[in-house]
Amino acid sequence: MRLLGEEPVVVGFGVADAPNDMRIDQAAGARRQVKAEHPGLRRSFHRQIHTDESQGWPFATTMQPLTRP
């Protein structure tokens, strides 16, 4: 991230009950670890936003406090 800086970088997560995807608690833990090492990194996204919406926004609700400065 030295070349880009932290602010323009976005971290994406695959959260689903499927192989090669994470559970929401795993994604939140990964986000906390990344934020600890790179506090200027602010943005995250769920690659299946329609899934998050259909489940009542658990990803957005969990990640929102973790993406604030």
Image (cartoon, rainbow, N blue to C red):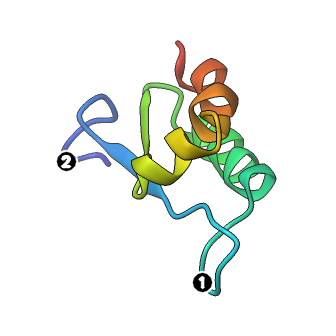
Q: Is residue 66 above or below residue 34?
A: above
**Where residue 19 appears, x then y in whole percent?**
64, 87
Q: Identify which amino acid the numbered label 2 is placed on.
A: Leu
Residue under numbered circle 1: 20
Helix, strand or loop for disc 1 = loop
Residue 41 appearing in the image: no
Q: Identify which amino acid the numbered label 1 is placed on.
A: Asn
Question: Which residue sits at x=69%, y=32%?
Answer: 62
Question: Which residue sits at x=65%, y=26%?
Answer: 61
In-image side of 4 versus 38 (left or right): left
- Label 1: few (<14), some (14–19) or many (≥20) C-alpha neighbours in 10 Å: few
Residue sticking out furthest to the right: 25
In-image side of 1 versus 43 (left or right): left
Residue 20: quadrant of the picture: bottom right
Residue 61's tag is none
Question: Which residue sits at x=23%, y=34%?
Answer: 8
**Where residue 39 appears, x then y in whole percent?**
53, 27
Helix, strand or loop for disc 2 = loop
Between residue 7 and residue 65, name the one nearer to us.
Answer: 65
Residue 45 appearing in the image: yes
Question: Which residue sits at x=67%, y=67%?
Answer: 22
Between residue 7 and residue 27, name the one nearer to us.
Answer: 27
Residue 3's tag is 2
First in residue order: circle 1 vs circle 2: 2
